[in-house]
DNA sequence: CAATGGATGATAATGATTATCATTCCCATA
DNA sequence: TATGGGAATGATAATCATTATCATCCATTG
């Protein structure tokens, strides 16, 4: 909490630990969509000894703190992503063959406007309190396209 | 294949079986999002003896035949939905608390236009062959809203 | 009727994630 | 500085959804 550069963001959190820092460092370094196992593998190269359970626990913890977002793209494992304020809002292209995930932030302005409108009307109509949205395109990436 | 009213749609398929018919019947009767277990429970009331493995196998089979769609809304089990030609294209509202899924087809025209445009440009830009898309809103349904 | 290939049911196996629990660590207070 | 308590951790068992295996069954064709 003190001296690690995140003080502002943690009001009602638990301890700031090396595990949590190490996990954030991984995201800072590799910037992209990482699964729990990606993070685990990456950490175990440098600092040994962190258990996989701690990785899962702290990914969830960091998500609760608002530092990470979690995505479930169909099959397989969940993906986590750093919530970077400087980063544009973006959506995902997911390859159905290899599972690769591509971010895109083009056209998002147009999308966002529409989505905001829709959101407003939908929450009224269905008495649904909308907190977030997720738009994905599924298909085949260039590597997998040739079957 | 003969006499059950689906002949046209099955060219290169395997046998048409009572299991497959039974599963489709469940969807016809209950019309909505059903998990494998929903289907299993529902079938075991009337016709006994179908195993859960057969349910999974045939849900997948029916999806390959284009009769069902499969959705993964984050946690929990996959949901299957009847592909009804008469039914409008729709998207989903998903309650983060209870997992309830609400369909909506309002505003979908506006969405679709934007999505088609985006799709075209994205596939060019990222050399990605887009096959489908999925837009979900996450939040709290009316029952869960009061915490 | 025998052979063939798909379909099925029971169940084992898998993979991701969560729960459990004993131990350790950190910090505040005595 | 010793101590007590709550949070964090690692190892591992448990869970849950789904898939794989395999022996059997069934319908069709030769």
Image (cartoon, coloured by chain):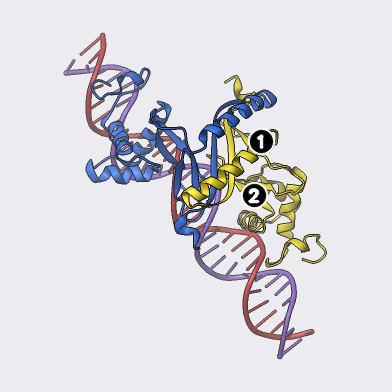
Chain colours: A yellow, B blue, C purple, D red
Q: Residue sitting at 52 percent across and 37 percent down?
A: B107
The label on residue A69 is: 2
Q: Residue sitting at 83 percent across and 64 percent down?
A: A3
Horizontally, is A23 left or right of A135 in the view? right
Give the quadrant of the N terminus of chain B.
top left
Image location of residue A122, percent across then percent down: 51, 46
SS for tag 1?
helix
Visible in this render: residue B75? no
The number of numbered discs placed on residues in the rendered structure image is 2
Q: Quadrant of residue B17?
A: top left
Pointer 1: what residue? A110
Horizontally, is B51 left or right of D1 in the view? left
Check disc 2: other Cα within 10 Å, few if <14, some if 14-19, many if 20+.
Answer: some
Placement of A28 over or under C20, stated as above or below: above
SS for tag 2?
strand
Q: Residue sitting at 60 percent across and 31 percent down?
A: B114
Horizontally, is B95 left or right of A140 in the view? left
Of badges 2 and 1, the one in the foreground is 1
Dot 1: chain letter: A
Image location of residue A25, percent across then percent down: 76, 51
Of B16 and A93, the residue lying toward us: A93
Of B133 and C16, the residue lying toward us: B133
Q: Quadrant of residue A110?
A: top right
Visible in this render: residue A1? yes
Image location of residue B96, percent across then percent down: 51, 53
Of A142 and D9, the residue lying toward us: A142
Placement of A27 over or under A3, stated as above or below: above
Mark 2 or mark 1: name the one nearer the start of the chain: 2
Farthest residue to the right: give it.
Answer: A3
The label on residue B118 is: none
């Amino acid at each position: 909490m003190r001296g690690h550069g995140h003080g502002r963001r943690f009001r009602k959190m638990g301890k700031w630990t090396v595990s949590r820092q190490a996990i954030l460092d991984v995201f800072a370094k590799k910037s992209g969509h990482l699964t729990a196992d990606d993070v685990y593998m990456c950490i175990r190269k440098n600092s040994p000894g962190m258990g996989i359970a701690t990785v899962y626990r702290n990914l969830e913890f960091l998500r609760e703190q608002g530092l990470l977002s979690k995505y479930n793209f169909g099959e397989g494992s969940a993906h986590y992503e750093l919530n970077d304020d400087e980063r544009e809002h973006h959506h995902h292209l997911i390859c159905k063959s290899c599972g690769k995930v591509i971010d895109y932030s083009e056209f998002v302005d147009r999308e966002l406007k529409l989505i905001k409108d829709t959101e407003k009307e939908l929450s009224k109509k269905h008495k649904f309190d909308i907190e977030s949205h997720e738009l994905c395109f599924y298909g085949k990436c260039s590597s997998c396209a040739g079957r």
